[in-house]
Image (cartoon, rainbow, N blue to C red):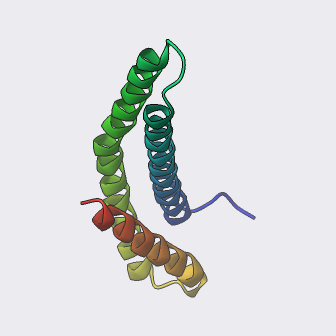
Amino acid sequence: MGPPSQLAIATSSLLRLVKEETSYHKELQQQESRIAKLEQDGGDENIEYTIKQEKRGVEETKAIFPQLKDRIKAAMEKLDMQIEAAQEDGSDSKAEEINKAKEAMVQAKTSYLKDA
């Protein structure tokens, strides 16, 4: 088996970025629920500092989304060009790769538009 095609590489790259974005969304939800729990429970003398640190973590996580969106958009554009090139090639052997790439585009567009 030869090296992966440019189409396969672009598809994997886009899927990785979408997965990364999903991971950051989960992390953000966890951080926000920790803050809510800390504010509700109160507790020790360090609670204000702990809440401040957690809020800083939330802001840092939120700051990642704009640049991640840009990277996803660039990966989508690159993959779109790779799909067009593969379709122009007309090779039946690339049909499965083209289908995987199109599925990745749908997944990325869903993720991209969800947060827009």
The picture places residue 111, in percent across and down from the top left corner, at 38, 64
| Left or right: 16 as drawn, with respect to 54 | right
Q: Residue at x 38, y 21 (%)?
A: 52
Q: Is residue 78 above or below residue 68?
A: below
The picture places residue 90, in percent across and down from the top left corner, at 46, 85
Residue at the outermost right position: 1
Q: Residue at x 48, y 55 (%)?
A: 22
Q: Residue at x 36, y 45 (%)?
A: 68
Q: Looking at the figure, which quarter contains the N terminus?
A: bottom right
The picture places residue 25, in percent across and down from the top left corner, at 44, 50
Camera-nearest residue between 26 and 14: 26
The picture places residue 36, in percent across and down from the top left corner, at 44, 40
Residue 65 occupies quadrant: top left
Residue at the outermost left position: 116
Q: Is residue 63 above or below residue 89?
A: above
Q: Residue at x 56, y 87 (%)?
A: 92
Residue 88 occupies quadrant: bottom left
